[in-house]
């Protein structure tokens, strides 16, 4: 049984295969040809963390594929009353065809997948956000930025940074990460990425200077400095991240025609300036829409590989 919990579990060829499938399905959708790849299948969607893009994209996505989405918040389930995750997995996976979970701990995803009879997809954890990276890379492909890219990530060493590490190390491109001191990527995840990079030829550069990271980059990306569950740390984080906002002066250091990506929600004049955001709004909202199409690619691919 194949699950989609982290890009760490996928080869370069598999990642690109899913991207190609997502682009194919997107083209069909734009032509009004909704092929029922997952006809009459049910996607159980478990949310321990709320979301705009994740819920809408998965619910619309399974509908467009001919199936039905079932929204389940943690308040709706016995999980909220202490039922073990393994029991929840064994019950729900007998009633649905696929499960998406958006949660805090990666271990929750892994435990659910261990006991599940159906494919499990990560809608996000504190460690990784793999479906977002599929949408990001799909957008890079559509804009022609997938050819020898140099990606600069500026900001927090969080689940997005970890996912960029996995994508770059699997596909073999250059990734430069600049974080404030004390906000570096997790050492074990970096270690895994460096091992994969030895095989793929990826160049991974870790540092604290955002200008150095962005200079000559073909893709610049960032994320919110205050993620869900970190609100109490907001004042300290805003102070610690001074100098890390991607503004016009910062983007001017990137390669000519560089694209800017943001997984959203974006907080203007914190991690990105209003002017940079609006100058790259087409790219950002194409990226947001591609959550829908990339996730359809993931769901269809998993369905096709149930016995692999």
Image (cartoon, rainbow, N blue to C red):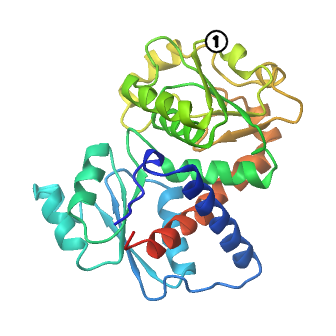
Q: How many marks?
A: 1
**Front position in the image: 63 or 281:** 63
Q: Is residue 163 left or right of residue 230?
A: right
Residue in the image at 51% along x and 25% along y: 156
**Front position in the image: 90 or 197:** 197
Tag 1: Cα neighbours inside 10 Å, few (<14), some, or many (≥20)?
some
Q: Residue furthest front?
A: 199
**Front position in the image: 17 or 262:** 17
Instruction: Residue 147: give x, y in percent of width and height.
Output: 78, 43
265, above or below 182, in the image: below
**Front position in the image: 64 or 216:** 216
Q: Is residue 44 left or right of residue 198?
A: left
- Residue 74 in view: no
Residue at numbered disc 1: 209
- Residue 23 in view: yes
Instruction: Residue 194: give x, y in percent of width and height.
Output: 50, 28
- Which quadrant of the view contains residue 86? bottom left
Q: Quadrant of the C terminus?
A: bottom left
Instruction: Residue 215: give x, y in percent of width and height.
Output: 77, 19
Residue in the image at 17% along x and 69% along y: 90
Residue in the image at 64% along x and 84% along y: 34
- Which quadrant of the view contains residue 138? bottom right
Q: Is residue 183 left or right of residue 248?
A: left
193, above or below 143, in the image: above
Q: Quadrant of the N terminus?
A: bottom left
Instruction: Residue 236: give x, y in percent of width and height.
Output: 44, 15
């Amino acid at each position: 049984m194949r699950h989609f919990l982290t890009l760490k579990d996928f080869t370069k060829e598999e990642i690109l295969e899913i991207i190609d499938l997502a682009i194919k399905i997107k083209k069909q959708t734009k032509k009004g040809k909704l092929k029922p790849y997952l006809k009459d299948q049910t996607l159980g969607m478990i949310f321990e963390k709320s979301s705009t893009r994740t819920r809408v994209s998965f619910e619309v996505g399974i509908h467009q594929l001919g199936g039905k989405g079932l929204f389940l918040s943690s308040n709706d389930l016995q999980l909220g009353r202490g039922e073990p995750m393994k029991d929840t997995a064994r019950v729900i996976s007998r009633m649905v065809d696929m499960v998406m979970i958006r949660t805090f701990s990666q271990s929750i995803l892994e435990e659910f997948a261990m006991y599940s009879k159906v494919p499990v997809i990560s809608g996000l954890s504190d460690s990784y956000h793999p479906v977002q990276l599929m949408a990001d890379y799909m957008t890079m492909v559509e804009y022609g930025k997938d050819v020898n890219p140099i990606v600069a990530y500026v900001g927090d060493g969080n689940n997005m940074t970890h996912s960029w590490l996995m994508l770059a190390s699997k596909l073999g491109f250059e990734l430069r990460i600049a974080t404030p001191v004390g906000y570096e990527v997790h050492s074990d995840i970096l270690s895994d990425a460096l091992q994969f990079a030895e095989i793929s030829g990826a160049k991974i550069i870790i540092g604290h200077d955002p200008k150095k990271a962005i200079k000559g980059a073909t893709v610049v990306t960032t994320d919110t400095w205050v993620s869900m569950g970190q609100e109490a740390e907001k004042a300290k984080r805003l102070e610690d991240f001074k100098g890390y906002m991607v503004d016009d002066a910062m983007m001017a250091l990137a390669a000519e025609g560089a694209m800017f990506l943001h997984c959203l929600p974006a907080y203007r004049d914190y991690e990105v300036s209003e002017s940079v955001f609006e100058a790259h709004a087409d790219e950002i909202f194409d990226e947001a829409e591609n959550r829908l199409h990339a996730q359809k690619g993931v769901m269809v691919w998993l369905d096709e590989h149930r016995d692999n």
